[in-house]
Every structure is written in C-alpha cells, then in structure tokens.
Image (cartoon, rainbow, N blue to C red):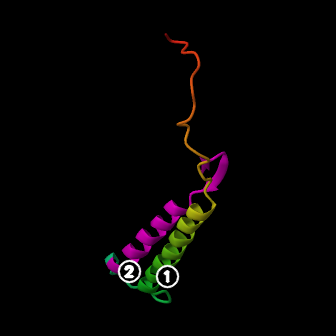
Amino acid sequence: MDTLVGGMALPMTTGTSIVLIAAGAILRYAVSASTSGVNLHTVGVILMIVGIVGLVLSLLYMAMWAPRRRGVARDRVIEHDPYA
C-alpha cells in the first residue's frame, strides 16, 4: 500500500521497518524455543538491525525528498466576499 505525498506515491517503509524491529525483538527476547540449524536469537538480532537501518533510511528519505511548502498565503486579498 502506498501513500500520496504531494501527488507522489511513496512506499510505506517506516511501517515495515517498525514491524521488522518488533518481530526481531520478539524473536530475540520473548522466544525460548530452540531449533537445530537456526538460532532464533540471531535471526531476531538481524531483523532488528535491518529494521533500524530501514527506519533511518526512510526517515532520511522523507526529510530530504519531501515536497517543501512554497509559502504561506497570508498576503492574499479578497476583493469581494461572496457570502456577504
């Protein structure tokens, strides 16, 4: 699902990053099961790192490439009020 910012479609990378961080934290701190061949704690740490990197990149992307406001419409003068 995409969001529209200034008419441009942007992927929801911030939400995905938060989900990755949450899933990694659950695997790292809340799961006590053990498997052969895959260490779930290591998978959790990897997911948290990937989520943090994705969150930082998405915040930088939003801060640097977001459309800027062109100005404030304080100087607009209304000649005729149609509701008067």
- Residue at the image position 51 percent from the left and 62 percent from the top: 14
Vertical side of 11 occupied by 77: above or below: above
Where is residue 28 shown, x and y percent of the image? 38, 80
Residue at (41, 69) in percent of width and height:
22
Residue indicated by mark 1: 46
Residue drawn at (66%, 51%) of the image = 9
Q: Is residue 1 visible?
A: no
| Residue at the limit of the structure toward the bottom, as seen here | 37
What percent of the width, then of the height, locates residue 34?
39, 85
Q: Which residue is mark 2?
A: 28
User: Which residue ends up furthest to the right in the rendered image?
Assistant: 8
| Label 2 crowd (10 A; few <14 / some 14-19 / many >=20) | many
Q: Regarding mark 1 in the picture, which secondary structure is present there?
A: helix
- Give the percent coordinates (x, y) of residue 47: 49, 77
Q: Amino acid at mark 1?
A: Ile
Residue 61: within the magenta?
Answer: no
Q: Amino acid at mark 2?
A: Arg
- Give the percent coordinates (x, y) of residue 58: 56, 66
**Pointer 1 or 2: first along the chain:** 2
Quadrant of res 35: bottom left
Q: Quadrant of residue 72?
A: top right
Boundaries of the magenta span: 1-29
